[in-house]
Amino acid sequence: MLGNMADLFGKVQEMQQKMSEMKEKLAQTEYTSESGGGMVKVTVNGLKKVLSVKIDKDLIDPNDPEMLEDLIVAGVNKALDEVEKQAQNSMGDLTKGMMPGGFDLSKFGL
């Protein structure tokens, strides 16, 4: 039984190290999405932080701010969806073989 506990503890430590490395990689990875046919470009990092928003000057209409607002929201959501998809794939790879059936780390903010 002690051998099993030591083995499990070792796997947990290994997973913590890999998670730390993955978080660092995510912080350095950028995702860019577009909306409005490329007139709005949003770049986020893998930690879901918005890094930049680029807006084509021809899109700026003081009489229709709602359209621009909608396109920004769409661009941000698209970029964050891509981050989420990549994070889930990475987590699945990380926990594969660690525990039967994998391990859902979304409850831990990862």
Image (tube, grey):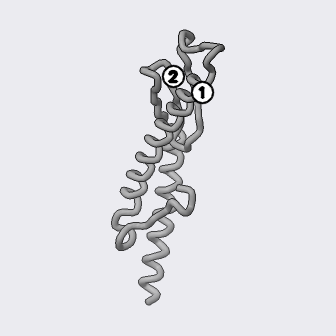
Give the structural element (helix, strand or loop) at label 1: helix
Q: Which mark lies nearer to you, 1 or 2?
A: 1
Quarter of the view holding residue 63 = top right
Q: Residue at x 45, y 26 (%)?
A: 34
Q: Residue at x 48, y 18 (%)?
A: 39
Q: Position of residue 88 (x, y in %)?
A: 42, 53
Inter-mark Cα distance, 1 to 2: 10 Å
Between disc 1 and disc 2, whose residue precedes? Answer: 2
Q: Position of residue 70 (x, y in %)?
A: 55, 29
**Circle 1: is it few (<14), some (14-19), or many (20+) Cα within 10 Å?**
few
Q: Residue at x 55, y 18 (%)?
A: 55
- Residue underneath mark 1: 69
**Circle 2: is it few (<14), some (14-19), or many (20+) Cα within 10 Å?**
many
Q: Position of residue 64 (x, y in %)?
A: 61, 18
Report whether 104 appears left or right of 53. Answer: left
Q: Position of residue 69 (x, y in %)?
A: 60, 27
Type of amino acid at the residue the image marks with label 2: Val
Residue nearest the viewer, comparing 57 with 4: 57
- Residue underneath mark 2: 40
Q: Residue at x 53, y 27 (%)?
A: 71
